[in-house]
Amino acid sequence: MKIKDIRTTTLACRVDPPYASAAGVQSQRGALLVEIETDSGITGIGEAGLGGGATATVIAKTLAPMLIGEDPLLIEGLWQKMFARTRQYGRRGIAMHAISGIDIALWDIAGKVAGLPVYKLLGACRDRVEAYASGGFYQEGKSVAELAAEAEDYRARGFKGMKMKIGRNPSTQTHLRQLLGNSTFCEVDPSEDLARIAAVRDALGPQAKLMVDVNCAWSSDFAIRMGREMERFNLYWIEEPVATDDIEGSIKVADALTTPIAGYETELGLYGFRELIGRGAVDIVQVDVAWSGGFSEGRRIAAYAQAHHRMIAPHAFAGAVLLMASLHFAAATPNAMVLEWDQNPNAVREELLTEPLRLENDSTVKLPERAGLGIELDRAAIDRYRVT
């Protein structure tokens, strides 16, 4: 069996009204599908990070030419080949996004050849994974009461955990958020963020997992001050409190607070996570398999985290294929905790699969038993949201 063709499809959908985190304002959501066709008629499906729209070019111009004609089951060898040949301009960033999408599609092919779901092919640890609702964004006119009602809805639907956004503050003792544009949209005083957290905690109840995501907006000193204020809310974790590259700052925050520090999805690859994990900058490791090297590199990161007694909580905030791939990854990873399930309106997550995921009454998602990723794409939905 040989690789016959590799093609990508860029998808996008509008978000109205837009919503925001400390990292910026979102008025559009997108996904980059990767499909690998073999000469035996088997096609693998993956999803890569969009990389500002440049990822598809890297796949088409650089990676596809070196892979066509190769055996798709030599997954590790192909991964190392892609990584080595993009070393001068890759290792992280867009090149790693591109490798990620291809790797996911190759594992989908391997599962279909073996007649096994990917999580079992990887060595299953469980057949269901606990999911948490990822929401609680800022939105123009959205009151604290409306945020609490959102949290109550998640609880009523069976979620035992929720993550919300904080950090859109006038002064965070760092300039990073202001550089991202729309800095005054839905800006709130830190005391308002604390009131938002209090309302969500009340709505969820004292036993539910409540996580907050700062999206790298704070300085380490500001993060410590806010972290101490938030201790009374019994948070499950504080996510990305400081800039990804401020490893010393994250170490400082992790050492100062009793609340676990989670991150950093914006780090990519084993060598990046080696620094965060090995130096104690994070307590919970958030790998995005569409950004950080697919299943192959994700497993290496998870193993390194396990060797340092750190848990994994996959980041999954894009399209439906990434959500499914992250579910398989979590089910095959011994030190995986929970799966992120984005609850914001997003057609390329909600409409793309002929059989969408379903939350069970115990806040878990069951793994499909079909071969590969176990998904079938709705081609009509792809046509609706295709970027031409």
Image (cartoon, rainbow, N blue to C red):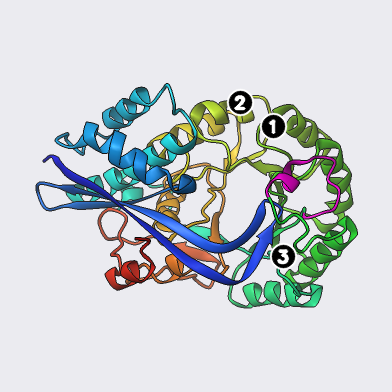
Real-space CA distance between mark 2 and mark 1, rounded to the nearest whole angstrom = 8 Å
Dot 3 alpha-carbon crowd within 10 angstroms: few under 14, some 14 to 19, many 20 or more: many
What residue is shown with label 2?
Answer: 275
Q: Splitting the image into 4 quarters, where does residue 219 fall?
A: top right
Hey, what amino acid is under mark 2? Glu
Nearer to me, 94 or 147? 94
Between marks 1 and 3 in the image, the one whose residue lies nearer the viewer: 3
Element marked by disc 3: loop
218 in magenta: no
Disc on the earlier residue, 1 or 3: 3
Indicate whether 66 appears above or below 127: above
Q: Where does residue 146 sit, x and y in percent of width and height?
A: 74, 77
Nearer to me, 243 or 330? 243
Real-space CA distance between mark 1 and mark 3, rounded to the nearest whole angstrom = 27 Å
Report the span colored magenta: 168-180
Q: Residue at x 78, y 41 (%)?
A: 175
Disc on the earlier residue, 2 or 1: 2
Q: Quadrant of the N terminus?
A: top left
Q: Residue at x 73, y 71 (%)?
A: 140
What residue is shown with label 3?
Answer: 138
Relative to 9, 51 lies left or right: right
Relative to 153, 355 lies left or right: left
Q: Quadrant of the C terminus?
A: bottom left
* Pointer 2 with pointer 1, Cβ within 8 A: yes
Name the mark on residue 281.
Answer: 1
Indicate whether 92 appears above or below 230: above
Residue located farthest toward the front when viewing the structure as drawn:
388
